[in-house]
Amino acid sequence: MELKVIKNSRVSPATDSFHDSADPLILPLTFFDLRWVRSHPTQQVIFYKLSESSRELFHSVILPKLELSLSLVLRHYFPLAGHLKWNLQDFKPQVVVYGHDTVSLTVAESNADFLFVSGKGIRPQKELRVLVPELSVSCDSSSLYSLQVTLFPSQGFCIGLAEHHVLKDGVGSIMFIKAWAHICKSLGHGTMTLPSDLTPIIDRTLINVRPSLESKILESMSYFSDEKNGKRTCDNLSRESRFTALQHTDPNSSPWEEKDGKRTMKPPPVGEICKDLVRITLELTHEKVEKLKERAKRESTRSQPELHLSTFVIVNAYVWSCLVKARGGNEERPLLFMYAADFRNRLDPPVPERYLGNCVVIINCIGYKTKNLLGRDGFVNAVEILSDSVRSLCSRGTEALWESYFDGMKQVKADTLVESVSGSTRMGLYAADFGWGKPVNHEIVSIDRYPAFSMWERRDEIGGAEIGLCLKKSEMNSFISLFRYGLDIAASRI
């Protein structure tokens, strides 16, 4: 694929009273935000097919609408134009937004086959990585949002984005995309206001968590340290090993210091991304999910009231068990599975769905071995593990879950097989219509940097899920075979 950069520009939020002030807006980081200070950016790409997409139409109609609507929506989502800052005198970082701040927008053109790149079949990961931008990050400052619009002449275009997780979680991420699309589609129709469900709330005082938890998370997150000067690094490790290597840092080191003792917000090193990675998007229809639920009911020794058989549990259990089988190896190898639990409705008082910030707790499932997920009963065992985990959320508070997460991370061994899931089937990303139809596909590109798969709702069906994976070619072939075989078993009631 050849990618030609047409221009690099900066987009300002549309003017309002905030821009007239010389004083910046300061957003303090909450307990939920601090976990992500040194995280790598989340990078996504959204593909749109066009019936007509000549260069002339794109540059005279489509791009100006995207730029204007971006400026208009940033008036509501202005923190995206700001920076994460950490001044020497401050105890913790904070988001700082000045009236003159902007969002970076790159416009590019690709000669690649749009149908292939935007499709759901096996594709080289490198074909998608060039379609997303990066963030500008230093020791004491980081941009929070960056965009890239790439035209595939006579085929379509895509929107690539890089975002810092410290500003918002997945709910806020998709809410912004849908808000931008809503305003873009409304241009020329006399109304450019946002509906209430897409209007963000940025008030950080809504997060009601004991202040002592913030100190605890700052003190305890030593696994974010950079290890240099002869200590363990991640430069030559596999994608699966980088995560566990980062958990085993010097317990006496600071999570915020580099080798020279200076404080830093740079993400830990990940080394070179494997060049053999390929992607695929697999679809589980509502019917197939129901078949898997029936299989779990038949084969589990537990009574149905003991099992939480949601789509989330079923899909993640199935993918997790297939991944463990595909990787094979030592049956005694320890396992770790992680997911993010939305706590908006679990805090007291509850946090509005429109809250633009982080309100998720990372949940780890640990204490299991590879042999637990191998064989015919591997899927059902995974269902029971995830079912127990999800059911326990209702009876455990934020502090207890954080303690459990951190204690679990201290138990992670260097050879642990780590998996995690990113995304949700409840976010409605495919509703993001900018005026040229809903997306044909959506991918989380950054799962090539850590062991994770993505999960989204299906484009053309209520129920079911789309699963995005990024694996080595040999692992991908094995996974696909196991994935399809397991569905055959569920369908045949063997």
Image (cartoon, rainbow, N blue to C red):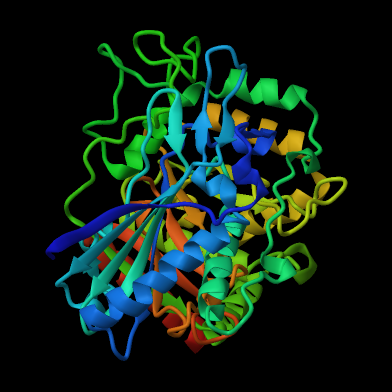
| Number of marks present in the image shown | 0
* Quadrant (top left, top right, bottom left, bottom right) of the N terminus: bottom left
* Quadrant of the image occupied by residue 305: bottom right
Taking the view exactly as shown, the residue that stands out farthest to the front is 20
Q: Classify residue 409 as left or right of residue 294.
A: left
The residue sitting at 28% across, 82% down in the picture is 57
The residue sitting at 61% across, 29% down in the picture is 407
Where 232 falls versus 411 (above or below)? above
* Quadrant of the image occupied by residue 400: top right
Where 227 falls versus 290 (above or below)? above
* Quadrant of the image occupied by residue 270: top left
Q: Residue 16 placed where, x, y %?
A: 63, 52
The residue sitting at 40% across, 8% down in the picture is 261
Asked if one can make out residue 277 in the rendered structure from this viewpoint, the answer is: yes
Q: Residue 54 placed where, x, y %?
A: 23, 83
Q: Residue 133 placed where, x, y %?
A: 32, 51
Foreground residue among 28 and 303: 28
Q: Residue 486 placed where, x, y %?
A: 43, 75
The residue sitting at 41% across, 12% down in the picture is 262
Foreground residue among 308 and 22: 22
Taking the view exactly as shown, the residue that stands out farthest to the bottom is 51
Foreground residue among 354 and 98: 98
Asked if one can make out residue 126 in the rendered structure from this viewpoint, the answer is: no
Taking the view exactly as shown, the residue that stands out farthest to the left is 2
Q: Classify residue 234 as left or right of residue 206.
A: left
